[in-house]
Image (cartoon, rainbow, N blue to C red):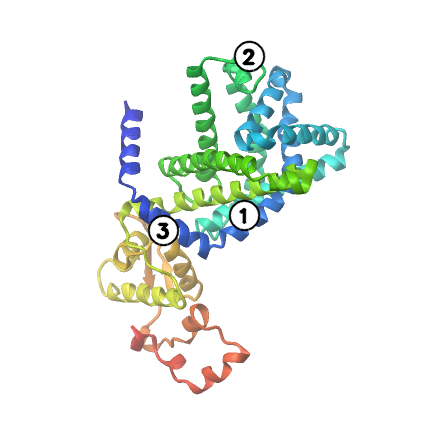
Amino acid sequence: MQFIEKFRSWLQDVARLPWLDAIVTLRERFREDRLGLTASSLTFTTTIALVPFITVALAVFTAFPMFAKFQDVLQKWLIASLVPDYIARQVLGSLSQFAGKASKLGAAGLAVLLGTALALVFTIDRTLNNIWRVRTPRPFGQRVLLYWAAITLGPLVLGASISITSYALSASSGLVGGMPGGVTLILEVLQFLLVAGGMAAMFHYVPNTHVGWGHAWMGGLFVSGCMEVAKKLLAVYLSKVPTYSVVYGAFATVPILLVWIYLAWIIVLLGAALTAYVPSLLAGLPRRRGGPGWQFQLALEVLQQLEAVRGHSEKGRTISEMCASLQTDSQRLEPILEALVGMDWIGQLSETQGRGNEARFVLLVDPQHTVLEPLVQALLLPRAAVTENLWKNDRWPACSLHSVL
């Protein structure tokens, strides 16, 4: 009963999510966070780490004979789910060949493979934390244990789930003859939900901040849906415009795979950005356009807010209160607060009673006796050789914070 209520509430959140604003937000995030460049970096890292990652993940099956017969089914299902049909067979054959050779390496070679696989997940960890504006990652040892568990236990959990429906998944992988249309549809829906669930789990667990399961599932379903659409569009393009096959011949699988990995990472990063901004979109906060000086302006507005409540009995304000009054979101506000805390201009109180368990920020400096120069250097115009005359000849850097507020 509780699950039904949560699911109904989640459907209501999906229905009232302003998708037009979400699209505009994703476009802004794609430009400001340079997600295209990030996807290029992840494409290179994935290409290098793909074989080691799959080798380490699937090698677990050799230690558990009960799952060994499902290894081929699982491998084929993963390729069919994540790679377009046009190149799935070639990719599966190449990965199987490379993984077979990698399994013959010694201890040093396997250690290098493991390090390469971990390098990929650490890159993903850093990228997702940047999208959520997380400045403090998990301790290194904790991250190693978390991702080692994901790499080793993930295939086992998935293998156990496949064992329950082994015949069905074998049929969907082409190992058994055709099946009725209704069963095929169920298998396609299951495949869609498994990909969405994997993305939702990544969005929930990887960022070192609280991400609600409902929001993570929105991002996961977005990624899974876009993946399916992208696979269909790429297949249509390759069938209508056989440029890669004509130019590269038998080597065409490699550039097509690179293009697909890049598109897949673009979709995953957009899904992460959507998940990160779902709370702000559901709260109905208006979008504030960024631009030159917007961080400096937002910092001044934060200081105004904190100065206004300085003489009140409950000094300080929470992030939620400042987001609501300044009409911004926490992803934009948190870097500003971090910069002001680093300058010792504001501080964060540890007491959380009566404020929804959310910490308050208070003003630590006296605006009358605090010059504006450190804030200008930090968020507006860093002092450099080309701007030295501006700093010397103009009086505005020496004005007090109070005169600006």
Q: What is the spatial separation of the Cα atoms under label 2 and label 1, in whole angstroms?
A: 39 Å
Q: Secondary structure at mark 2?
A: loop
* Mark 1: amino acid: Ala
Q: Measuring 53% from the left and 13% from the top, which residue is drawn there?
A: 167
Decide: few, some or many residues near mark 3? Use Cα within 10 Å; few <14, some 14-19, many ≥20: few
Residue 336 against residue 126 in the figure, above or below = below
Labels 3 and 1 touching (C-beta < 8 A): no
In the displayed structure, 204 sits above or below 305; it is above
Task: Determine whether, in the image, residue 366 is placed left or right of residue 197.
Answer: left
Q: Residue furthest left?
A: 312
Labelled disc at residue 385: none
Determine crowd level at label 1: few under 14, some 14-19, many 20+ residues with C-alpha closer than 10 A.
many
Q: Nearer the viewer, residue 225 or 206?
A: 225
| Nearer-N-terminus badge (3/1) | 3
Circle 2 is placed at which residue position? 177
User: Residue 301 in the image: x percent, y percent?
Assistant: 31, 65
Distance from Cα at disc 3 to Cα at disc 2:
46 Å
The foreground one among 16 and 175 is 175
Can you give x and y, in whole percent of width and height, for residue 362 in the image? 32, 61
Q: Mark 2 or mark 3, which is nearer the start of the sequence? A: 3
**Label 2 crowd bin: few (<14), some (14–19), many (20+), radius 10 Å:** few
Residue 378, quarter of the rendered image: bottom left
Question: Where the N terminus falls, by quadrant?
Answer: top left
Between circles 3 and 2, the one closer to the viewer is: 2
